[in-house]
Amino acid sequence: MSRSDGILQGRVAVVTGGASGIGAATVRRFLAAGAKVVIGDMNVPAGQAFMADLAGSGFTEQVRFQAGDVSEEADVIELMGLAESEFGGIDIVFNNAGIGGAIGSILELDVDHWDQTFAVMARGVFLGIKHGGRAMRKTGRGGSIINTASIAALSGCGGPLAYSATKAAVVNMTMNAATELAYLNIRVNAVCPGIIFTDLMHRGHVKEAGQTVEKIQPSTLKGEPEHIAAMVQFLASDDSVFVTGTTQVVDGGYLANGLLGVHPLPGVAKRPTYSGMNYGTTGKENEIRFLEPKKDNPGD
């Protein structure tokens, strides 16, 4: 990891879901740009392994890890408090933690899985804005809050139903929070990744996912976590000082191509034959059940 020009020198950042994927790529980028970073993640083994890796790259004094669940307010308060006590305040919050969430037929979705999806993906972002914003208000120097949404928020067939609905909520929450917090010089923006090759996206089926993406994504590049981290760093830095309330799409032209009726993401199908919960990279085992095929029956 090479050190950059210090574009975030002296800043303090909190990154949720920071132990893997887009979160980890952003942590690396923030550290290289001179920031101090507190990583939040509920996957403790992944967090510990990432911290060891960062130490091997020479980053020890300026990074901390805190285990926690972003859907629990007490955990979010503790995470923000760690950044304040260790590094003296918060300048950047990247609300990135997420799961695949409830997947499968809407006719079969478990309501508890639906609630868990919204708890992590929507309530978690709300809590990050609330308590990150409070920390920024204390210092009086403003700050930047970035929320991970998705192209699934901006279209049909871009992701599973519950996942897509939470991301649409994040986009709207971003606009409203940006309007409310502008007087504190707190900027709030969202980033909408396209098909990014993380474990949460391909679930080990890298080749198959790549073949599908080639059919519908105009860009010949494979979406990588670093592509999103670059946009997040821009939104966190003074280079975007006049940017707030926006949704930045980073998708290799995927949305511009109209999706073409293809469903490349795990958990998306026109007529799902399964139902359950995708816990992503949290370390929890997924809960998937396959539905018995039924003949069409108006009485079903």
Image (cartoon, rainbow, N blue to C red):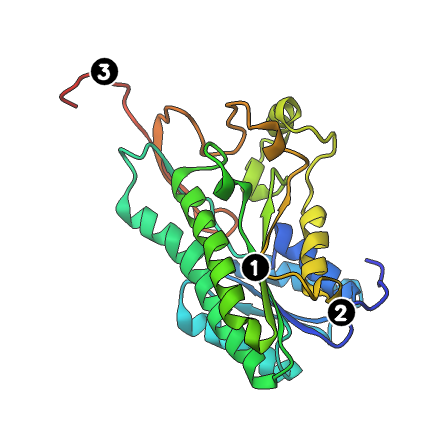
- Nearer-the-camera pick, 97 or 256: 256
Looking at the rendering, which quadrant does residue 255 occupy? top right
In the displayed image of the protein, which residue is found farthest to the left? 299
Sequence-wise, which precedes: disc 3 or disc 1?
1
> Vertically, is 65 above or below 150?
below
For residue 106, say whether it is visible. Answer: yes
Q: Which residue is labeled 1 in the image?
A: 245
Residue type at the position of mark 1: Gly
- Residue 144 or 67: which is nearer the viewer? 144
Residue drawn where x is 84% and y is 63% of the image: 3
Q: Residue at x 61, y 28 (%)?
A: 257
Q: Work out whether mark 1 precedes mark 2 in sequence or the reverse, and give the earlier one.
A: 2
Q: Residue at x 43, y 56 (%)?
A: 122
Q: Where residue 267 sits: x, y (%)?
A: 45, 34
Marking on residue 8: 2
Q: Classify 10 Å Cα crowding around label 1: few (below 14), some (14-19), many (20 and above).
A: many
Q: CA distance from mark 2 to mark 3?
A: 59 Å
Q: SS at mark 2?
A: loop
